[in-house]
Amino acid sequence: MVVAILLLIPVAHAANVEIGRPHIVFLSDTAAAIACKSVSRRACTTMNTLFICACARAGDEWTVRTRLTATPFVYATSQTILKHEMEHVSDIASSLNEYADSLTLHTFTTEETCLSFINSEVKLFPHTLKLIQRLTTIKRDGVQFASRPGE
Ligand SMILES: [Zn+2]
């Protein structure tokens, strides 16, 4: 019963996710092509992330505690494209929150199994972040751009 009540509170994030203030750089088309490593690029966004996991005892079980900090670095050639990039940042922030929340739902009977789980999640995190970026690229730019993550 207590668990059901806790899960119904939508505003409370179980995980600790912090999105840093975006670093925004305006540049020329030529400079954007270089910074974004593609001739046709008008903008790109990279996320500087810090992902820390720990296992904590909760009664008879072990649960995951996370701290995830993501700071966006946005390179844009115009205000219009900056607005578009900020929509990507917002999508990425939502996905990171969902991901971090999902980690806290796991419970383990021993500390060892918990540690083994968080070790693999931390190891996989660069891949997870790529998938999250691919997701927002498909949503905002279309599937044809999805092989070029971060645009
Ligand atoms: Zn885009």
Image (cartoon, rainbow, N blue to C red):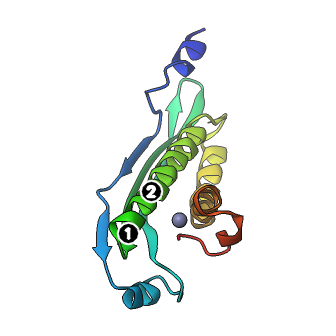
Task: Give the quadrant of residue 79.
Answer: bottom left
Q: Are marks 2 and 1 in contact (CB under 8 Å)?
A: yes
Q: Position of residue 42 (x, y in %)?
A: 46, 77
Extreme residue toward the right, this view: 144
**Residue position marked by numbered label 2 in the rendering:** 89
Position of 137 relative to 8 (above/below): below
Q: Position of residue 51 (x, y in %)?
A: 46, 57
Q: Is mark 2 within 8 Å of ligand 1?
A: no
Q: Residue at x 29, y 57 (%)?
A: 21
Report the amino acid beneath label 2: Val
Measured in 3D between alpha carbons, the distance from the residue under mark 2 to the one under mark 1, in whole angstroms, is 9 Å
How many C-alpha atoms fall within 10 Å of the one at disc 2: few (<14), some, or many (≥20)? Answer: many
Q: Residue at x 38, y 74 (%)?
A: 75
How many C-alpha atoms fall within 10 Å of the one at disc 1: few (<14), some, or many (≥20)? Answer: many
Q: Which structural element holds mark 1?
A: strand
Where residue 74 is drawn, which disc sits there? 1
Q: Which structural element holds mark 2?
A: helix
* Nearer-the-camera pick, 41 or 17: 41
Q: Position of residue 120 (x, y in %)?
A: 64, 58
Q: Residue at x 44, y 90 (%)?
A: 34
Position of 100 relative to 29 (above/below): above
Report the amino acid beneath label 1: Val
Task: Give the quadrant of residue 126.
Answer: bottom right
Q: Position of residue 33 (x, y in %)?
A: 46, 87
Position of 56 relative to 67 (above/below): above
* Nearer-the-camera pick, 114 or 41: 41
Task: Give the quadrant of residue 63.
Answer: top right
